[in-house]
Image (cartoon, grey):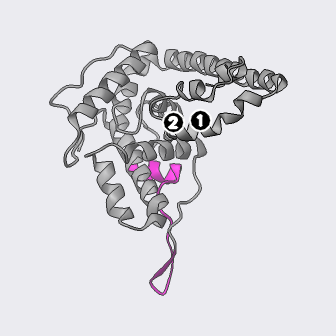
Amino acid sequence: MLNALALGETDAAVLAGMADVNLRATPDQLRDALGAAATLDQRYRSVLQQYPDRLELIERQMQELDQQLAGALNIHESAVTRLAQVPGLGADSAQQIIAEVGPQAEVFPSAAQMCSWVGTCPGREESAEKSKSDRSPKGNRPMRRILNQAANAAVKAKGTVFESLYRRIKGRDPKAHKKAVWAVANRLCRIAWKILHDGVHYEEHGNRPNLKAVKHRARRLARELRALGYVVQPPPSQQGFA
């Protein structure tokens, strides 16, 4: 849509028709928003063209860096693959976590110590048995960012333990969203330690996982890993994670 607009397209309906199917805006809303295309000055179109070019350059550089990171972690292929199987995570986030804590998280004797280092453990300030603060302490910023993003994705995976945990904590209170997401991030951190430290695979113990969605995610993850040069093997049926 941006490229077409930059190259001179003036028909709002044509531009709206290029929208991604997952875009939340309705065709009418898009046509209304793009109505000014007919009067957009050519100078602004020239400026607009620079943004897609810049984004394309950034994406190409990110792909090159991803390939370099995958090459550096190739000897830890098993750890990357096992960690990437966790709902909410993926090839990219698995690589970033291993780059931060190591392929076996060996510097952390326990999951609790790794969570404390990352800063996912809720803080407690109490006076007269009344909690004043549930905020998490400061910790490793890259890991906190990765786990926060992963938690927001994991809670959307239907039938998983992460969705159940999120719903149980959040309830009907919209203000409890951040607290619930952070609890999921803490669970993800503990699971990541277990997978890396003990060399196990993730096994879902949620209520009713959507098998179709699980298979779709597995195929997508396999494509991501293969694109980075990893050899994808199906997880052993007997090796699990509790």
Q: Please state which amino acid type lies under the numbered disc 2.
A: Pro
Q: Please state which amino acid type lies under the numbered disc 1.
A: Arg
Q: Is residue 95 visible?
A: yes
Q: Is residue 15 above or below residue 173?
A: above
Mark 2 is surrounded, within 10 Å at the Cα level, by few (under 14), some (14 to 19) or many (20 or more) other residues, namely some
Classify residue 172 as left or right of residue 141: left
Q: Residue 34: x percent and y percent?
A: 65, 34
- Pick the residue in front: 39 or 202: 39
Is residue 161 on the magenta stretch?
Answer: no
Residue receiving disc 2: 27
- Which residue lies at the image location 27% right of the left edge and 33% below the top edge? 214
Q: Are marks 2 and 1 in contact (CB under 8 Å)?
A: yes
Residue receiving disc 1: 31
Classify residue 65 as left or right of residue 53: left
Q: Quadrant of residue 77?
A: top left
- Which residue lies at the image location 16% right of the left edge and 28% below the top edge? 237
Q: Is residue 55 visible?
A: no
Is residue 128 on the magenta stretch?
Answer: yes
Q: Residue 83: x percent and y percent?
A: 37, 32
> Could you say whether the residue bearing mark 1 is in a helix, strand or loop?
helix
Q: Quadrant of residue 218?
A: top left
Residues shaded magenta: 111-132
Q: CA distance from mark 2 to mark 1?
A: 6 Å
- Which residue lies at the image location 36% right of the left edge and 63% below the top edge? 169
